[in-house]
Image (cartoon, rainbow, N blue to C red):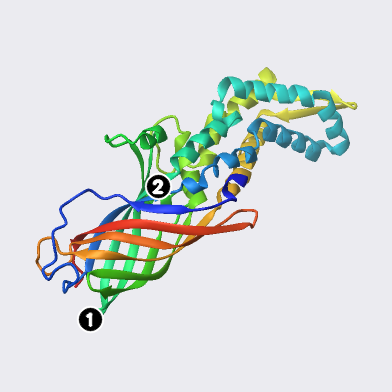
């Protein structure tokens, strides 16, 4: 986690298709056109300051084979007492661990036993986040003051970071994440909605102080969950579902129990036996323990306190502002880690909006 402790800068860049901007009816500094209306924008957040954040979480992943063994040993302690449980652990603990690990190395996908490479990939992808958003500008006091509402509609990341970093003209393939998917996720990501005041000054729309809050960690968790799916992302699938499906607890229990459907041994004069169904339950509990402890690490709220301005442009000279262009933002950011430690630093950005409707 030390990699994000030395925060220097976070940039926000907005990418919009290039169009002719034209001129305002009264000239650059004499705009009488109203900016009131609805605008679409696609924003690109440069998160390179957070390089290493998600890769740094990989050591927190407790391998399921260890957690499953712990659940089985705990069930023996509970059923037969700690003395017999201790003898059972001494007699077959190493063998049991080897059988569980061997089964998972043979049957389970590699990421279950070593999640680091998956986290490295997510870390690279999350360094650039594109956001589709809607900007509503409503008149508050005639001629000068406006209320601005900004709503995020969807998020995308570049599928192959090498494509993004190459600077090639051909658009890179993206993983698109709709707002419904984020809200319906196993660990939901709340959609950002920001409201603030803006004032008109010549051809400039000055945007007052406002805050943008996003759980950056939960967004990374959503991406990781879909990253490890073997096929296209499936709605409603969470990390617990993926992990349980990948391990196949009934198959593991069958391997341990054998033809008698019991994993048993005599220790201290006592016949200790664990049924097939109990082994299945122990396996599932071990998987959930691995996942639940891990996802807590992804609770990483990000806050940005911003202010800025944009130039208003009437492209077709019809008395309405068609574009909010040349937008600049600056302010401060802060991030809260699970440990309780907080860090802050500067944030800057750029944006452009294109009118898509009116507000009566």
- Would you place residue 135 above or below residue 222 in this image? below
Which numbered marker is on residue 274?
Answer: none
- Furthest-right residue in view? 268
- Disc 1 from disc 2: Cα separation: 36 Å
* In front of the other: 151 or 284: 151
Residue drawn at the location 38% of the way across and 61% of the way down: 329
In terms of secondary structure, where does tag 1 sit?
A: loop
In terms of secondary structure, where does tag 2 sit?
A: strand
Residue drawn at the location 63% of the way across and 45% of the way down: 293
Judge left or right: residue 248 versus residue 355. Answer: right
Q: How far from the left and from the top, in percent, is residue 232?
A: 38, 34
Q: How far from the left and from the top, in percent, is residue 305?
A: 46, 65
Q: Which residue is mark 1?
A: 142
| Proximity of marks 1 and 2: CB atoms separated by less than 8 Å | no
Q: How far from the left and from the top, in percent, is residue 206?
A: 32, 70
Which numbered marker is on residue 129?
Answer: 2
* In front of the other: 201 or 137: 201
- Would you place residue 243 above or below residue 322 in this image? above
* In front of the other: 243 or 115: 115
Residue drawn at the location 78% of the way across and 27% of the way down: 93
- Would you place residue 74 above or below residue 352 in this image? above
Residue drawn at the location 17% of the way across and 51% of the way down: 19
The local crowd at label 1, few if under 14, some if 14 to 19, many if 20 or more residues have their Cα within 10 Å, is: few
């Amino acid at each position: 986690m030390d990699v994000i402790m030395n925060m220097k800068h976070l940039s926000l860049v907005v990418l919009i298709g290039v169009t002719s901007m034209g001129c305002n009816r009264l000239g650059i500094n004499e705009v009488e056109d109203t900016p009131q209306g609805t605008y679409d924008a696609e924003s690109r957040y440069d998160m390179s300051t957070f390089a290493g954040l998600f890769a740094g979480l990989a050591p927190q992943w407790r391998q399921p084979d260890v957690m499953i063994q712990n659940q089985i040993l705990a069930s023996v302690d509970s059923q037969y007492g700690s003395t017999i449980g201790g003898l059972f652990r001494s007699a077959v603990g190493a063998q049991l661990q080897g059988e569980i690990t061997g089964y998972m190395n043979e049957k389970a996908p590699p990421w279950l036993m070593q999640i680091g490479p998956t986290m490295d990939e997510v870390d690279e992808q999350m360094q650039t986040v594109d956001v589709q958003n809607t900007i509503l500008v409503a008149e508050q006091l005639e001629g000068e003051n406006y209320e601005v509402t900004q709503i995020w509609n969807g998020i995308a990341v570049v599928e192959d970071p090498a494509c993004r970093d190459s600077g090639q003209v051909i658009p890179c393939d993206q993983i698109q994440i709709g707002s419904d998917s984020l809200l319906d996720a196993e660990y939901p990501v709340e959609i950002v909605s920001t409201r603030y005041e803006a004032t008109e000054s010549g051809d400039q729309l000055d945007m007052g102080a406002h805050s943008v809050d996003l759980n950056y960690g939960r967004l990374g968790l959503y991406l990781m969950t879909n990253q490890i799916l073997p096929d296209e992302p499936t709605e409603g699938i969470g990390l617990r579902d993926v992990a349980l499906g990948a391990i196949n607890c009934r198959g593991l229990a069958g391997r341990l129990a054998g033809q008698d459907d019991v994993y048993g041994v005599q220790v201290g004069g006592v016949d200790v036996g664990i049924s097939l169904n109990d082994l299945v339950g122990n396996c599932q509990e071990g998987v959930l323990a691995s996942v639940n402890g891990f996802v807590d690490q992804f609770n990483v709220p990000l806050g940005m306190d911003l202010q800025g301005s944009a130039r208003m442009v009437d492209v077709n000279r019809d008395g309405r502002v068609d574009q909010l262009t040349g937008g600049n933002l600056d302010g401060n950011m802060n991030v809260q880690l699970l440990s309780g430690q907080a860090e802050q630093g500067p944030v800057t950005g750029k944006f452009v909006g294109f009118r898509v409707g009116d507000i009566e």
